[in-house]
Image (cartoon, grey):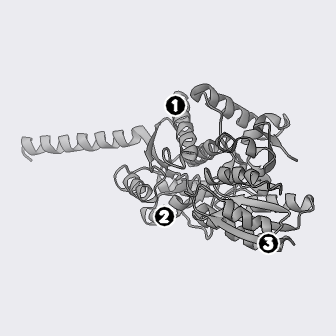
Amino acid sequence: MTIARAAALALAALLALAGCSKESDSVKIGAVLSVTGPASFLGEPEKNTLLMLQDEINAKGGIEGRKLEIVVYDDESDVNKCVMAAKKLLDQDKVVAVLGPSISGNTLAIVKLFGPAKTPLVSCSASEKIISPVDPWVFNTPQLDRHAVLKILQDAKKKGYARIAILTVSDGYGQSGRAVLQELTPAQGLTLVADEVFGPKDTDMTAQLTKIKAAAPDAIVCWGTNPGPAVVARNRVQLGIDTPLYMSHGVASKKFIELAGDAAEGIVLPAGRLIVAGQLADNHPQKALLTGYAEQYAKRFNAPVSTFGGHGWDALMLTVNAIRAGKSAKPQDIRDNLEKTSGFPGTAGIFTYSPANHNGLDENAFVMVVISKGDWKIAE
């Protein structure tokens, strides 16, 4: 072997070692969120939460001694930009896991990418279609539509309501909720007397509410995310409709109360306990986590915490927990250890994943809340 060849081999070995060292210096996790656009009220607190936790984890020594690096892309609430961002995270950034998206429709558009890429996705979106049927590589963190519908209908039955009208948005989140409402309303012994739909960009729902009023329901269930449900709340008051109005967990942020104004008063919805953490009993297993997160978020961003930021908290910390449990940040190991998660306290509830359940929660993760004097109040 010549001296030149030996030197070249030595240099190649050093470069290889340098590459390995660089690769192992950090754990790179991707996120695609709706930080701007109509769904920014979901994605902005999710992004804030991820970056806040990244700083906190790194300040405490990282994950298994490695720095946490979170790469966040904004899909601008657009499904095509979401697909492009997900492909970039997988193909170019080579992340070990992806968190998000914020919106169910965007999530459903990218789930098919993760099996072939053998990389886990932990979605912050609630549609049941995301995890049913189970895709081995796809998990989510919000409580399911089915759990929310069940809580609403159980509350309606308790109050003696028998005739139910539904008003749902036509996007992925609304279609999923509508299907569950159509299934569970009769299954719970109630009668579905009206079934109206509005578009995600509609600004006036008086036509749908007028039809619903004519059907004389005992209660109305509106299913959507802002801004549509706030329009429904205002139109209901403008039309003089005093029929009780339920909302879904898709509006469990102060942004809804801000958009709906006084028309939000008295509206009831199922929500995670994060927005009413201060009202929980001191011995509740989630209270310390929820109050600590809420205080930390408010101090850093000078804004109230929201349920949706909590979905980001759960997505990241479940992933970090899986890495620590397996002492490995390889995508296959993260997936396998996510599936073994049991009794993990998160902001949305106590998570227990399994090969047959990639949501990990049940209806007990919800509490019914009522909007009173511009704030949330536990209603049960």
Tell which circle, 2 or 1, labels the residue nearer the N-terminal end: 1
Q: Secondary structure at mark 1?
A: helix
Q: Which residue is mark 2?
A: 109
Label annotation for residue 192: 3
**Residue 50 in sight in this render:** yes
**Residue 355 in sight in this render:** no
Report the residue at 79% width, 36% height from top: 373
Q: Which residue is mark 1?
A: 55
Label annotation for residue 8: none
* Closest to the observer, 378 or 361: 378
Tag 2: residue type? Answer: Ala
Residue 197 figure quarter? bottom right
Of all residues, the one furthest to the top in this rendering is 299
Report the residue at 63% width, 61% height from top: 358
Residue 261 in percent (x, y) is at: 70, 41
Q: Is residue 106 left or right of residue 130?
A: left
Report the residue at 73% width, 68% height from top: 211
